[in-house]
Image (spheres, helix red, strand yellow):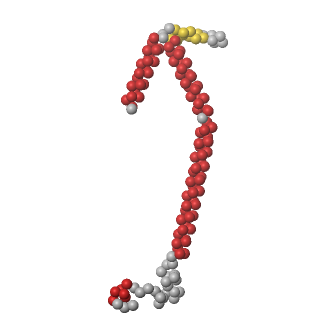
């Protein structure tokens, strides 16, 4: 693709040089309020006029896109603020989930549904597998 680009560029450069060389008749430029006049080849005058038009058009397009660029910057700032808020809320949710798990699952020293407050296992706990394997219940 890069080779194709350079082939096109070289083609247009050759066409431009041919255009300027072919249209070499001098054109006089002057103004009623300036004391001097100058002449340049007509092909160069056309190329300069086209370049000036491209520059002016680019400047106008750039200024016209200012509102869209401003709205895009504002939207980016808003997205950033919303992402920060979302991350803060996710951290709060994770903290609440951790607290809920800590409350729901008692530690080894806290009483739970299978352990009475005294710390000894209840008599209603299911028999262990070893006891059933030996025939004791």
Can residue 42 be seen at all in this image of the molecule?
yes
Give residue 94's position: percent from left, percent from top. 54, 65
Quarter that holds the C terminus: bottom left
Total marks in image: 0
Give residue 60's position: percent from left, percent from top. 60, 29
Instruction: Answer above or below: position of 101 versus 5.
Output: below
The residue lying toward the viewer, choosing from 35 and 112, is 112
Instruction: Answer above or below: position of 62 versus 72.
Output: above
Give residue 99's position: percent from left, percent from top. 55, 71
The residue lying toward the viewer, choosing from 24 and 126, is 126
Can residue 120 be seen at all in this image of the molecule?
no
Q: Residue at x 55, y 18 (%)?
A: 49
The residue lying toward the viewer, choosing from 93 and 80, is 93
Q: Residue at x 60, y 11 (%)?
A: 30
Q: Residue furthest left?
A: 134
Q: Residue furthest bottom?
A: 136
Q: Report the side of 72 relative to 128 (left or right).
A: right
Give residue 21's position: percent from left, percent from top. 45, 12
Q: Residue at x 52, y 12 (%)?
A: 42
């Amino acid at each position: 693709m890069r080779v194709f680009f350079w082939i096109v560029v070289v083609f247009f450069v050759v066409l431009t040089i041919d255009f300027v060389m072919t249209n070499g008749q001098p054109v006089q430029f002057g103004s009623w309020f300036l004391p001097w006049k100058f002449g340049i080849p007509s092909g160069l005058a056309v190329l300069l006029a086209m370049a000036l038009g491209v520059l002016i058009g680019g400047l106008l397009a750039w200024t016209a896109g200012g509102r869209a660029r401003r709205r895009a910057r504002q939207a980016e700032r808003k997205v950033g603020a919303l992402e920060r808020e979302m991350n803060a809320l996710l951290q709060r949710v994770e903290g609440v989930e951790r607290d809920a798990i800590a409350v729901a699952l008692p530690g080894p020293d806290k009483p739970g549904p299978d352990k009475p407050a005294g710390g000894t296992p209840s008599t209603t706990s299911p028999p262990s597998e070893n006891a059933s394997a030996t025939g004791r219940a």
